[in-house]
Image (spheres, grey):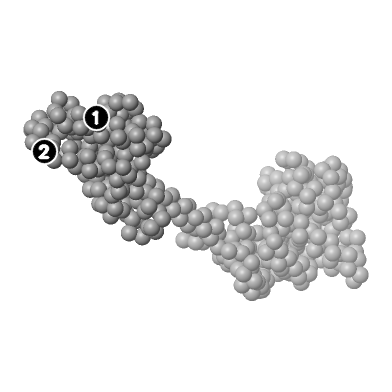
Amino acid sequence: MNESENILAGKKLPLPSPRSPAQLDERVLAEARKALPRQKTYRQPWWFAGSAAAAVVVVAVTLNTTNLTTMSTPAYENIVTDSESKTEAARTTLEPRLDMRKASFESKVAKPSVHDAHRQEKRMPVAAAAVAAEAAPAPAAPSPATARLALEERMNSLPKSAMAGQAMSDTDADIQMHYEKEVEQLPGNILNTLQRLTELEPSSDNAKIAISEYEKLRASCRACGLPATLEEARKKYLLP
Amino acid sequence: MAKMWNRLRSDESLMLAYQRGDMGAFESLYQRHKDALFTYLFRSCSRHAIVEEVAQETWMAVIQAAVRYRPEAKFRTWLYQIAHHRMVDFWRRPDNRHSNLEDVPEETAPQNQGEIIDEIEKQVMNALAQLPQEQRNVVLLREQGFSYEELADIVGVGRETIKSRLRYARQQLSTIIGTSDEAIVGATLEGQP
């Protein structure tokens, strides 16, 4: 009875507790090993899904990084870099715009200084003759090669930040806006002529020639809608 | 290192690892439950040959079901559910149709296993053998530490049915063993729900 009381203290029925025999263990484990290859073919390793997800993330990040780099260049850079491979039709379409940009850029960036003004006085007759020659009805447009060369020179003079597609400086932004707003409507040769006419000093004799030539220019292109005076035209098309 | 890690893992985790091809996980799982399962089966039947056969069938069923195993319930509950059904199937065989073990020669564990069955244990085993099979199974599963809900899942009946079977089993065992040992019966059949 003492023994049963001791068992009672454990709160368990006094029952035998035999252990699993060794031969049974061997049989069971052997069967488990035999079944193992079948189970391996059904399931992938636990890390497979995680590695696949990580690989997808890495590829996505790489593609996004690549896209950010290639999309950062401005549109006009493509014109310069791909000019060699463009067709004749595309080049012809671009010519008037290239001329306008060249002319406006020269007026903005290459403004004559005091010294240049003196030199210009000496060169006026020559310049006037040149302008007169250019102001002839329907002057020939510059060749595509010349226009491209002019644009390339302009592009090379721009700051590196603009070429790399970063934010343009205020001056470059103004040039860009000026091109797009006021100059789109005018043919390229008209704008060239206008530029040369306005370079003449108002007080010189050549100014009268310039005004006269301007009137001829207006007459040659009624549809262009040029203002009544040369000064108005200069303010409208050549100044910001 | 892997064995140490497997000792810390849950049964469900080990089973899923075996499902993925980790043999070491199954070995750990088997080592964890093999003795308790064998004990339960032995207390149900007391015939070593039959107990080994049922135990082997139980583990074979676990191995074959590993491919589609889902940890929807506790592994231990699932394991004893398989063992319980295997034991019920054994008793339903035509040559094993005994409502209890009264007519079955009593067997004790072989001495080479190191187990000593004293008189009290024999007395309790004899009393259990006189219980109806349904009540005996519930008592023995309760001895393994299962709650009422887990017992209901294993046996496949409601919680109240489990409680009533345990109550009747207690009364029967008290009658069989004697009033002096009624505390032994009560100590086991009470406890956590």
Q: Residue at x 70, y 45 (%)?
A: A11
Q: Give the amino acid type for the residue marked by disc 2 in the picture.
A: Arg
Front position in the image: A25 or A72? A72
Q: Would residue B167 appear left or right of A162 to someone viewing this image?
A: right
The answer to whether B56 is drawn above or below residue A114 in the figure is below
Earlier residue among tags 1 and 2 = 2
User: Residue A71 versus residue A128: which sits nearer the camera?
Assistant: A128
**Residue B90 on image: x %, y %:** 84, 66
Q: Nearer the viewer, residue A28 or B25?
A: B25
Q: Nearer the viewer, residue A74 or B70?
A: A74
Q: Chain of mark 2?
A: A
Q: How would you rate the neighbour count of disc 2 (Cα within 10 Å): few for under 14, some for 14-19, many for 20 or more?
A: few
Q: Residue at x 71, y 67 (%)?
A: B64
* Alpha carbon distance from label 1 to label 2: 18 Å
Q: Are marks 1 and 2 on the same chain?
A: yes
Name which quarter of the figure residue B122 lies in: bottom right
Q: Name the residue at 33% across, 55% down.
A: A83
Q: Which mark is residue A123?
A: 2
Q: Which residue is mark 1?
A: A211
Identify the amino acid type marked 1. Ile
